[in-house]
Amino acid sequence: MRKFFPVEELARDERFNKITMRDRMGDPRTALNVSNDAPAKRPTNLRLTPDRSDASDGARSLMHGIFVGEIQALEGAGRTCWDFETGTEAPFALKLDMARQCWDEARHVEISVKLSDWMGGEIGQYAENTVLFEAACSTDPVLRLAGVNRALEGLAIDVFTTMKEFGDLAGDPYLEFCEDWMLADEVTHVKMGSDWLRKITEHDPDRRKKALEFQSVVDKLFSYGGTRSESQESPIGLARRFRELAGFTDDEVDDIAQLSMQALNERKSAVAQARADQMRDAAAQFATSAAAE
Amino acid sequence: MADPYKPRAPFAPWDRRTLPGIFDVEESARRVGNYKWAEMKLFEALGGWVATVPELDVKMRLGTHCYKHAWHAELWHKRLPELREMNPERLTAPANDAMVRFVEAMTEPEAPEQTIEKLVGVYRVFIPRFIAAYTYHLNGTSEITDAPTVRSLKFILQDEFDDWRDGEMILQSLIETPEEASRAAAHMQQLEAIMIEAGGIAGVGTLGAS
């Protein structure tokens, strides 16, 4: 078995459909679509709540996203156990933590499958974006921990908090109960990442800087063009309290909040530009047909 | 109530623990170092394989079992200094070169179509060898002088039996044709041949015979 497994070769059964980030953002079911049949004005509150007309489908879609995300988190933690030599490339205790994370993520996959079924979803109903595993492909274990444990698992804290609140508001104690258990594990995983990042880079400020920069890139990527931010325009909120429990400083949470808002604003600008382009093309087409007549 | 000042035997009639055991401190430490090395190699392989198997249930079981073997490695790591090995890395070693070759051969399958080979190596060859080595150690050591090792062995053996059962049942559900049965048997034979050369998890003498 090779060291460093390519994302394209992640093994899946025939129910799964892997797509890229570009494909995902082009999916008409995403919150930010620019298709002709999309409403012209973007709603000011997109937070996933039971009173949204598309709440059921939105919750199922998010749960499927959690499910495939957990699979990739499991795969990423497993690869960290395998890809690095104990002692020379990664400390023994770090690898033990990654093995522990494998077990936790395997349980999360089990929980997600059962929750999806409970919510009326099916495996493979939505496409799988493999960008999460890509963050786990770095050849430096510290960068992996920054990208996966601090950025990706940090996003998981936000997602599970949103889903837990959704379960509470929807009067679904089954969903709320399961999400709360997964949330406890994710706080542990983020704390693992924070602790190892500080420990390994204690005397290596350059490596720490590089790792934090990588985390920032991944954080922005995982903000999914504004899918996660403190704005009500984002379906997923930023769970400040749980992030603090997981070892993020106030400044770090502020940075992520700012980054997420930036991603949201960039996406809104892109949508506005796309709409303007569509209007311009339509006007040009109309002018051409009118001239021909 | 019985008179609390009446002398009682230090060992109750049902307490059959004896002295001495068959391992001295050095031999016990050497074996524990071999166990740790082998458990490490196993948890690393299980973790690495998760991304390579397409079967969802297998993926999840590998992730779960990965942690259990990491925990075993951790237990042995912590036991080594208690056996006078203050540098646990020194004794964290394969029993011999054949054991290294065994692990290389066991971890060689990577393709998504090779789930049977991956599981055969772990659940039909490696884990049965762990069960044998640990059972021999448990039966041979002194439950009095080596009680901490005995306690760990009992926890670990419970895991090994559970995981062996899990893996064997998954294999039985995956092997559906005579051709697949032949594939499994051929791979098992190849790995067993190397393991015989290695002599077991702790090398020649793992089960006492030299």
Image (cartoon, rainbow, N blue to C red):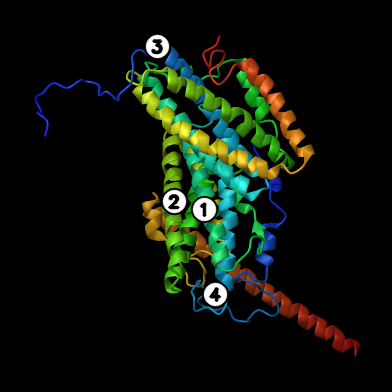
The spot of residue B139 in percent (x, y) is: 44, 21
Extreme residue in the right direction: A292
Q: Amino acid at mark 1?
A: His
Q: Is residue B20 above or below residue A241?
A: above
Name the element at disc 2: helix
Identify residue type, mark 2. Asp
Left or right position of A269 against A165: right
Front position in the image: B107 or A42: B107
Disc 3 designates what residue? B24
The residue at the point 68 percent across, 76 percent down is: A275
The answer to whether A151 appears left or right of B177 in the picture is left
Asked whether residue A249 appears in the rendered view, the answer is no
Q: Which chain does tag 1 point to?
A: A
Q: Position of residue B77 (x, y in %)?
A: 43, 26
* Quarter of the figure with residue A24: bottom right
Q: Residues within 10 Å of mark 3 (few under 14, many from 20)?
A: some
In the image, residue A281 sits, relative to residue A211, either above or below, namely: below
Mark 4 = which residue? A55
Q: Nearer the viewer, mark 1 or mark 2?
A: 1
How far, Cα to Cα, is label 4 from label 3? 67 Å
Q: Nearer the viewer, residue B197 or A158?
A: B197
User: Are the residues under badges 4 and 3 in a single subunit?
Assistant: no
> Which of the two labelled residues, at mark 2 and mark 4, occupies the earlier sequence position?
4
From the image, which quarter does the N terminus of chain B lie in? top left
Check disc 1 and report the residue beneath it.
A108
Characterize the local packing of mark 4: few (<14), some (14-19) or many (20 or more) Cα atoms within 10 angstroms: some
Disc 2 target residue: A185
Q: Quadrant of residue A9?
A: top right
| Chain to which the residue tagged by mark 3 belongs | B
3D distance between C-alphas at marks 2 and 4: 26 Å
Q: Quadrant of the C terminus of chain B?
A: top right
**How far is mark 1 from mark 4, CA to CA?**
22 Å
